[in-house]
Image (cartoon, grey):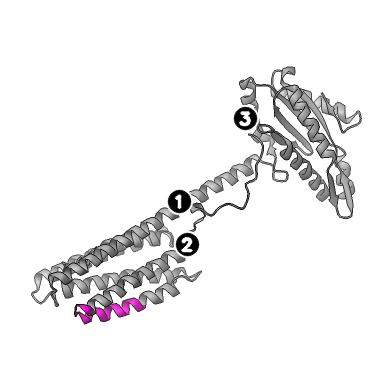
Amino acid sequence: MGKVRVIGRNMKYNIDNIKISNSLKYRLMFISGAAVHLCFLIVFFSIRVPELGVVNIFSVLMYVLGSFFSVNKDTGNMRFGWMVAFFSEIMVHTVLCVLVIGMEADFYLYLLVILPISAYVLYFSCTIEVFFRTICVFVAVSLVSGSGSVMVVNSFEMFPVCPLSYDDISKLRMINMLSAALMLVAFSLLFVLEVHGLIKDLGRTNEKLKYIATHDELTGLYNRRSIKPLFEELEQSGEPFCVVLGDIDDFKKVNDTYGHDCGDKVLKTVSRVLLDNISEGDTACRWGGEELLLIMRGSKEECYERLSAIRERVISEVVPHESFFVKITVTFGFVSCTEADSIEALITQADKLLYEGKTSGKNKIVV
């Protein structure tokens, strides 16, 4: 435990700030599908297979429409419908290509690609029950479509309908292998980025929860419960340290005169002064009410000098409240680690010294 540090907001944008939304995944899915089918449209007309070229015109139109309508917010059912349409289009297109031009062009690769992409997109955008049910259906349809089209081509002489030359088959095979690989790599990277972001979000949430559990909400100081483990650590370390118990003078009078809002401002002002002026390794804690506990590392002389500077800094503060300005002073009880056997005993002694200071004039350090 030590001095609380505030991280600045002007941080450079980095990979931890990337957010992968469902809209981005669906849009990327449909844009990549439209690009691949636009390529097929050109190729099929160039190799004189106009039937498949016409099919790809409709495919491109579907993907363009999908890229616009599937990204709207609060349309989970619509997105799921577009996911089914995306999968169905690939199944139909693959089967048609196998029946028309044969298996050698490797169109069945898309049956392998669509399953992990569908699993990834659906897992983060629907319930777990819908996810498993849908993926089971997709796997079954892929197996039936792939094996069925292969059986048809091998069983009937009329298939493939338009056999292609070796050069055309090689051209299509190259396109299919490249497209399938790029889609897998793109969505794999997207998946890694999303998981990385989720892990970072979880880490940030845990840090926030840890902070909430160990710090006082009003002042930002450590709370009484969280500081206890530090006691044993210091007692076992053997290094010199001092215990200081402080109390804001006339705090009840401030609350009664100006209200609790003003009292909160006073508490936050004193806490800010402590955090800004304690040394690295020192710990400030809200011990209870307006009582503040400081664990200061170093010799008695060093700690006393630092505490004196803190007291002077508190005296210089003025808390504005409505049309009033409230002056603040704090009384401290100061004990060195050589004066008792345990921190609990030191705190007890510091409390006695604090009481002595409160009854003998306030705004002082009693050693």
- Residue 277's disc number: none
Q: Quadrant of residue 70?
A: bottom left
Q: Residue flagged by tag 1: what amino acid is it? A: His
Label 3 sits on a secondary structure element that is helix
CA–CA distance between discs 1 and 3? 33 Å
- Where are the magenta residues, as a range? 46-61
Which comes sooner in the sequence, label 2 or label 3?
2
**What amino acid is found at the position of numbered circle 3 in the picture?**
Pro
Identify whether 252 is placed above or below 241.
below
Residue that numbered label 1 is attached to: 196
Name the element at disc 2.
loop
Assess whether mark 2 and mark 1 are in contact (beta carbons under 8 angstroms): no
Q: Amino acid at mark 2?
A: Ser
SS category of the residue bearing label 1 = helix
Q: Which mark is residue 21?
A: 2
Q: Nearer the viewer, mark 1 or mark 3?
A: 1
